[in-house]
């Protein structure tokens, strides 16, 4: 008897609700008895000329659709932020690590050719270390794709500076060895960035694809290198990482 009184009161409450209030109800969240009353009240409202759109199922679907769009937008923004953070980490982070190692490097660089050579070696080595470190520490997918904007940037430089002469000499740094100034810009501004981002991406990709996930692999190095430049990256859980 008590249930009947409560259900009758619930029906009256549903009928007394405004269209906006009734639209907020979700049928799937109701009990079986309440759902039956919901259907009866919805039919009465529709017969009375109330907007059928206020019925719970469409509203729930619409809300789920909006949530899905919002989630997709959030993922895109997070992906763009991760891509930017990884790009800055590959370019600026490697540059900082090279600067820290410069006192040792100066012991072996006595000519402009040796400086170009150590730039190649340093960019490759430090980009690989940083790429592996970030992937192991943060497990971020965007680290594997920063070679794409770097390649587009390099192609832009190739189109602009191809008139300087042989592109192989210009963009490899060989032309910079023999002549300073404008001939060094294509190498330092475009090639170096491409090398760092490409090696960084490759290292992150190989680390993610590795069957042996050494979570304890140089833990201090991983925390220091990745923490210096990419503290804001979203970290994926272990299950997500294994599916990638």
Image (tube, rainbow, N blue to C red):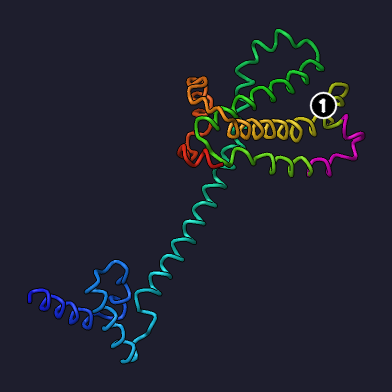
Q: Which residue is tagged 1?
A: 173
Q: Would you say residue 165 sits in the magenta stretch?
A: yes
Quarter of image, res 22: bottom left
Q: Residue at x 34, y 74 (%)?
A: 56
Left or right of residue 91: residue 67: left
Q: Residue at x 74, y 18 (%)?
A: 118
- Vertical comparison of 26 with 15: above or below: above
Residue 125 place in picture, x, y as percent = 67, 22
Where residue 195 sits in the image (x, y, percent)? 72, 31
Q: Is residue 65 above or below residue 108?
A: below
Q: Quadrant of the C terminus?
A: top right
Instruction: Report the magenta residues as a range.
Output: 156-169
Quadrant housing the N terminus: bottom left
Relative to 62, 49 lies left or right: left
- Where disc 1 sits, the SS reads loop
Residue 99 is left or right of residue 46, and the answer is right
Residue at the limit of the structure toward the right, as seen here: 165
């Amino acid at each position: 008897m008590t249930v009947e009184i409560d259900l009758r009161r619930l029906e009256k409450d549903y009928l007394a609700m405004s269209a906006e209030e009734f639209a907020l109800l979700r049928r799937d969240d109701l009990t079986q008895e309440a759902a039956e009353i919901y259907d009866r009240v919805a039919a009465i409202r529709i017969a009375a000329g109330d907007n059928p759109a206020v019925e719970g199922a469409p509203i729930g679907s619409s809300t789920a659709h909006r949530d899905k769009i919002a989630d997709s937008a959030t993922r895109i923004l997070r992906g763009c932020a991760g891509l930017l953070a990884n790009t800055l980490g590959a370019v600026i982070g490697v540059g900082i690590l090279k600067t820290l190692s410069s006192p040792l490097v100066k012991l072996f660089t006595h000519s402009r050719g040796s400086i170009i050579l150590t730039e190649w070696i340093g960019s490759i080595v430090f980009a690989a270390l940083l790429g592996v470190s970030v992937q192991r520490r943060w497990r971020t997918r965007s680290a594997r794709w920063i070679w794409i904007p770097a390649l587009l940037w390099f192609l832009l430089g190739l189109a602009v500076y191809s008139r300087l002469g042989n592109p192989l000499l210009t963009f490899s740094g060989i032309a910079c060895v023999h002549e300073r100034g404008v001939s060094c810009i294509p190498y330092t501004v475009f090639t170096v960035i491409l090398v760092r981002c490409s090696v960084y991406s490759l290292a992150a990709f190989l680390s993610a694809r590795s069957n042996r996930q050494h979570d304890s692999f140089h833990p201090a190095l991983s925390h220091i290198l990745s923490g210096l430049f990419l503290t804001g990256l979203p970290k994926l859980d272990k299950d997500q990482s294994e599916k990638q």
